[in-house]
Image (cartoon, rainbow, N blue to C red):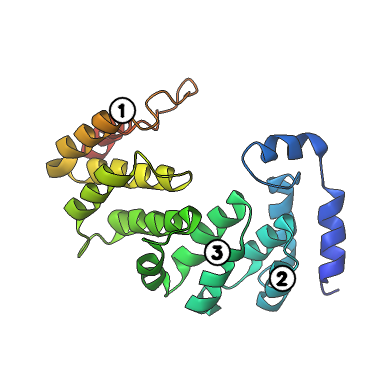
């Protein structure tokens, strides 16, 4: 039996948990669906680009998350992905769109350059996430010193989630590039972004000097 949008919307609605919604809303996500159960639905549905497009068009967060799990990332045009990012309201939708779809798209570099300096902090954040991906996987041609200059000038005053994404770029530059590590740590120490962020036992602080120092031991080792 083929899946339909109304049936899937009803199935997702039945998974709504008020307590989970309360937790998710603290992070800006307007749903109460257990993501493990949502992934199980995606596994059952399998890849279906047409259905994914229809689910995305509902503008409902659980449906859009499901759409991102069953779509074909390489099929979307750059304009479509740009529109989808600007349409996305929930942080989790933007996160999955960038990590599960855009990073697998042949348009990723085109979109990275388009989004980096966007006035919308959520869009610019996606550009920085793609920049971090380049630093990790294909750093050739990336002006690392230039990015450190930009981080030093703008990260302190940047809005969430842009500040988080810039901080991650700062950390990965320091971790992956020993020659730039002292400068990256120094920038983090001067800006003190996320210095007092509460960190659970056993986890590494997102404060860049600590993050860089701890992770570089693993990378260098």
Distance of label 1 from label 3 (alpha carbons): 32 Å
Disc 2 designates what residue?
57
* Lower sequence index among marks 1 and 3: 3
x, y percent for residue 150: 26, 50
- The N terminus: image quadrant: bottom right
Disc 2, SS: helix
Distance of label 3 from label 2 (alpha carbons): 13 Å
Task: Look at 25% across and 41% down and name the residue there.
Answer: 175
Task: Look at 56% across and 64% down and name the residue there.
Answer: 86
Vertical placement of residue 59 versus 54, above or below: above
Determine whether, in the image, residue 25 is placed left or right of residue 110: right
Count the marks: how many? 3
x, y percent for residue 18: 81, 38
Disc 3, SS: helix
* Lower sequence index among marks 1 and 2: 2
Determine whether, in the image, residue 219 is placed left or right of residue 25: left
Residue most extreme to the top: 201
The mark closer to the camera, 1 or 2, is 2
Frontmost residue, 99 versus 191: 191
Task: Look at 85% across and 57% down and name the residue there.
Answer: 11
Task: Look at 20% across and 33% down and name the residue there.
Answer: 186
x, y percent for residue 26: 65, 36
x, y percent for residue 187: 23, 36
Disc 3 designates what residue?
85
Disc 1 designates what residue?
210
- The C terminus: image quadrant: top left
* Lower sequence index among marks 3 and 2: 2
Q: Residues within 10 Å of mark 1 (few under 14, many from 20)?
A: some
Disc 1, SS: helix
């Amino acid at each position: 039996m083929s899946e339909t949008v109304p049936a899937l919307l009803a199935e997702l609605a039945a998974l709504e948990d008020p307590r989970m919604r309360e937790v998710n809303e603290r992070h800006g996500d307007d749903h109460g669906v257990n993501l493990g159960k949502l992934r199980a639905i995606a596994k059952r549905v399998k890849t279906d680009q047409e259905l994914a497009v229809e689910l995305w068009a509902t503008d409902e967060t659980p449906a859009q998350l499901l759409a991102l799990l069953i779509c074909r990332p390489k099929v979307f045009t750059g304009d479509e992905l740009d529109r989808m990012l600007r349409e996305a309201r929930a942080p989790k939708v933007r996160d999955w769109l960038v990590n599960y779809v855009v990073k697998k798209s042949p348009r990723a570099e085109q979109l990275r350059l388009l989004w980096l300096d966007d006035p919308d902090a959520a869009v610019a954040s996606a550009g920085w996430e793609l920049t971090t991906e380049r630093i990790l996987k294909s750093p050739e041609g990336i002006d690392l010193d230039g990015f450190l200059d930009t981080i030093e000038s703008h990260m302190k005053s940047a809005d969430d989630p842009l500040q988080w994404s810039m901080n991650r770029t700062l950390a990965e530059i320091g971790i992956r590039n020993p020659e730039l590590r002292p400068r990256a740590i120094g920038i983090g120490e001067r800006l003190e972004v996320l210095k007092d962020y509460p960190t659970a036992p056993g986890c590494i602080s997102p404060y860049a000097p600590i993050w860089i120092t701890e992770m570089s031991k693993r990378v260098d080792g």
